[in-house]
Image (cartoon, helix red, strand yellow):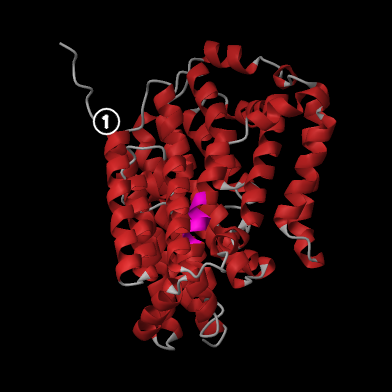
Amino acid sequence: MQSIKRIGPGEIAAIAAVIMTVVAIVLVTMGRDMGTAILVIFIGTYAIISSEKVNRTAMSLLGMALVGVILWIGSSPDENIFEELIVHIEWTTIIFVIAMSVIVSVAASSGLFQYIALRIAKPSGGDHKNLFITFLVFVAGISLFFDTVSTMLIIAPLTIEICKALEIDFKPFLVSEAIVCNFSSIPSIVGAVPNLVIAGETGLDVGFLFLTFMPLSIILFLVSLPILLRWYGKTFGTTDEYRVDVVFSIAPTTMIKDRWDFNISAVAIIFLVIGFALGPSYGIVPPMTALLIASFMLLLAHEKANEFLNRIGWPTVFFLVGLFGLVVALELTGLIDALGDVVGAIVGDNATFATVFLVWIPAMLSAFLDNLPVSAVLAPIARDFAIVSPVIPLALVFAVNIGGYIFTPLGSPANMVAIGLSEAEHNPIPFIEFMKIGTLLGMIHLAIGTGYLLLITALLGG
């Protein structure tokens, strides 16, 4: 007798997608309520994605396609509203993600990051505490120039290899690095994709962002480091001198896999940093800088260019396309404006309350949802409330980055990179462990950041 195939998560998700599609079509055809229909698709799509039982890229693209169908049904025949939806997608952010992926891919394959890791790890002498501090300082530094996912893709594999060679448990390192890269990215427009989305929507000045948040980022690091050292202190020790000698007797230059790509990558990253720092003063936005450098790196890579292109995180890219399509649909139907009206009725013109509100509420949302959709939905609201106080867009940037690691590790893709790599090593990071230290630090960071932003508000006369 032929066995009946068991219904899996994919089939359940497909059934849920059909149900929400039918509900949305009924709403738009019977009552011409296009806004509610779009909202059903948006909530349903993200509920299915958040279950982590299906491919998030596939579901994101399906959600975008479904809102396209709803817009087509609810519009007049002479309107090409789906084309309008496509035009308004945040293509600059998507180009930035692709370009940065290319740069990281070429640099990693050249051995540049391995070379740097061995250089910075050697002075620790095998002392676990010193190595821990060294890696966290390194993460805090590069987080200003790479987005959080790129930062973790650079540092996490290197951390695992060095920790394995020195017989150190790498899990405390990965958890701490993920948390540090999240809050260290706050002062930089390129430090996290949500920063770029919020800045693009609100017109947030790059220099204002950096000058305001760099002191706070340093404060958060100085507060976090003793807590992390105390939390993981019992796991630290010193590796046997013989093993340390074996590991660190390796010349860093042996890490260089391709001298040509190594030199290109080193020069490219120098220009990248200069471009990010000086470009905005001349109207050159970070995606333009990243694309220019990435395309030159591919051109100079000759026959290996296709290999580097294949290493781009295309699932993430297409996830962003679908996500931004869903958010644009909310904008086209006036739902974001309506949400802004609700928030406006709550906060009024009180700059202090508005700042506190846009720190804690988005942070709580980001704890359970990916911080990117939270940023995309709330950025237009932050833009409108910037007239109340210029600190409001800053509050949203701060909130979504900190919210990425409180309560759950699901709020930030960087956390998931760390967890995924630990699972690949068959030594997974316990969910509860990440939740404990992430929530403890996150709540402390939110309290410090709220006070800091209120001080800035007062200084600016808000």
Q: Residue at x 45, y 56 (%)?
A: 69
Residue 193 to residue 349: above or below? above
Residue 50 falls left or right of residue 151: left
The three-letter code of the residue at mark 1 reads Gly
Q: Position of residue 30 (x, y in %)?
A: 30, 68
Q: Is any part of residue 440 visible from this angle? A: no
Residue found at the very far front of the displayed protein:
77
Q: Quadrant of residue 279?
A: bottom right
Q: Residue at x 22, y 25 (%)?
A: 6
Q: Work out which quarter of the rendered image holds the N terminus and state it.
A: top left
Q: Quadrant of residue 305?
A: top right
**Residue 324 sits inside the magenta stretch:** yes
Residue 68 to residue 352: above or below? above
Residue 347 falls left or right of residue 199: left
Residue topped by disc 1 = 8
Of 395 and 217, nearer the camera is: 395
Residue 221 to residue 114: above or below? below
Disc 1 element:
loop
Of 323 and 1, nearer the camera is: 1
Q: From the image, give the main secondary structure of the stretch colored magenta.
A: helix
Q: Is any part of residue 318 visible from this angle? A: yes
Q: Position of residue 354 (x, y in %)?
A: 42, 79
**Residue 439 sits inside the magenta stretch:** no
Q: Position of residue 172 (x, y in %)?
A: 41, 34
Residue 449 falls left or right of residue 267: left
Of 59 and 396, nearer the camera is: 59
* Magenta span: 322-327
Q: Position of residue 417 (x, y in %)?
A: 47, 36
Q: Residue at x 73, y 60 (%)?
A: 285
Of 377 and 148, nearer the camera is: 377
User: Label 1: few (<14), some or many (≥20) within 10 Å?
Assistant: few
